[in-house]
Image: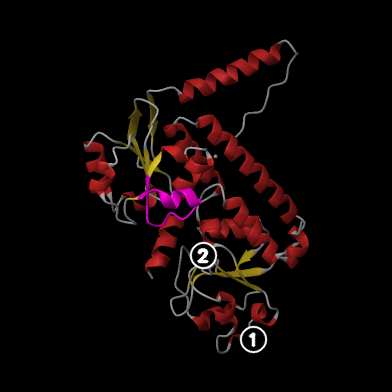
Amino acid sequence: MNKLLSILSTVLLSAGVLAGCGSQSAAPEKQEEKQAAVKEEAEFPLKLTDASDTDVTIEKEPEKIVSLIPSNTEILFSMDLGDKVVGVTENDNFPEEAMKKEKVGGMDFNVEKIIGLEPDLVLAHESGAHNSAEGLKQLRDAGIDVVVVNDAQSFEQVYESMEMIGKAAGELEKSKEMAAGMKEEIASIKEKASSISEDDKKSVFVEVSPSPEIYTAGKDTFMNDILMTVGAKNAAADQSGWPKMSEEAIVKLNPDVIVTTYGYYSPNPIDQVTGREGWDSVTAVKEKAVFDVHSDKVTRPGPRLVEGVEELANAIYPDVFSK
């Protein structure tokens, strides 16, 4: 159950600039304007308003950073800032280098340990900021800059998370380039999905934890957006958030596809589903359309999200998305 809470907190727990048109003589000028704008945004001291509506002033480019959630960590490493990361949580498992960093706790972080690492910047997360408000205040009182990153519930909000982290860490331009690349890849996936007719769209039930505590993703979740992106229908769309579901209720939904996201910590997830008593009548089981996808790739709002979306798309519609 603790692992599930960690996953859910992570879940419920961004773009390039187009070159302007004009004469050849005007092009260099526009390029200089763009570079100047980026440079101005990245200059220190800089001010930003974080996801907790707190105005933060960062006097100089951070040299030592602590990340309090795996998605922030993955974004930092993707911007080649791994050398600056001095502390991460116990849940950080990617990239491999992150696992070698000092651990500062899990969902409840160790304030004293963080202060002892003497970071310039702590990147917190909106999903846990309310419960850890006192700890974050202690970090601020110790003179550490704290930025609360938004709890992304859509692709656009993921891009915003990336740019906030990039700006705070002094790599705004790199974060925008990363977001722009993701946008292009997601747009390509949507283009392929547009070829799926309404009649051919499959209903998909997503299990984010195994029996007997089966939880799924309803509407108003990032997972629901992912399913729509790949041209699928969420079998639990009449539910909101992350509801607990009984086996009997799932059988009644009779999904075309069942996707589990817990294979990395619970063995044989597909066998767990197909071996349930009374589930042999479920279309997904009959058609052998039960798949496991890597949880971190479809729940962490970061650079690996595209890999997760592609993995999910290929599992549901292999004929459409196969490369």
Who is closer to the viewer here, 133 or 239? Answer: 133
x then y, percent, for residue 2: 37, 67
2 or 1: tag closer to the N-terminus: 2
Q: What residue occupies the far top of the structure in this picture?
A: 25
Residue at the location (47% across, 24% down)? 41
Q: Amino acid at mark 2?
A: Gly
> Do residues under tags 2 and 1 come within 8 Å of each other at their CB atoms?
no
Residue farthest to the bottom, as pictured? 277
Q: Above or below — where is 125 with respect to 209? A: above
Q: Residue at x 63, y 87 (%)?
A: 280
Q: Is residue 97 magenta?
A: yes
Question: What residue do we see at 54% from left, 18% from top?
Answer: 36
Q: Which mark is residue 218?
A: 2
Q: Which residue is mark 1?
A: 281
Label 2, label 1: how many angstroms apart (C-alpha)?
23 Å
Residue 15 as seen in the image, left or right of residue 162: right
Q: Label 1: few (<14), some or many (≥20) within 10 Å?
A: few
Residue 150 seen by the camera: yes
Q: Is residue 21 above or below residue 288?
A: above
Mark 1: which amino acid? Ser
Q: Position of residue 48 (x, y in %)?
A: 39, 31
Q: Which residues are magenta?
A: 87-102
Q: Does dot 2 land on a helix, a strand or a loop?
A: loop
Residue 159 as seen in the image, left or right of residue 142: right
Magenta run includes residue 185? no
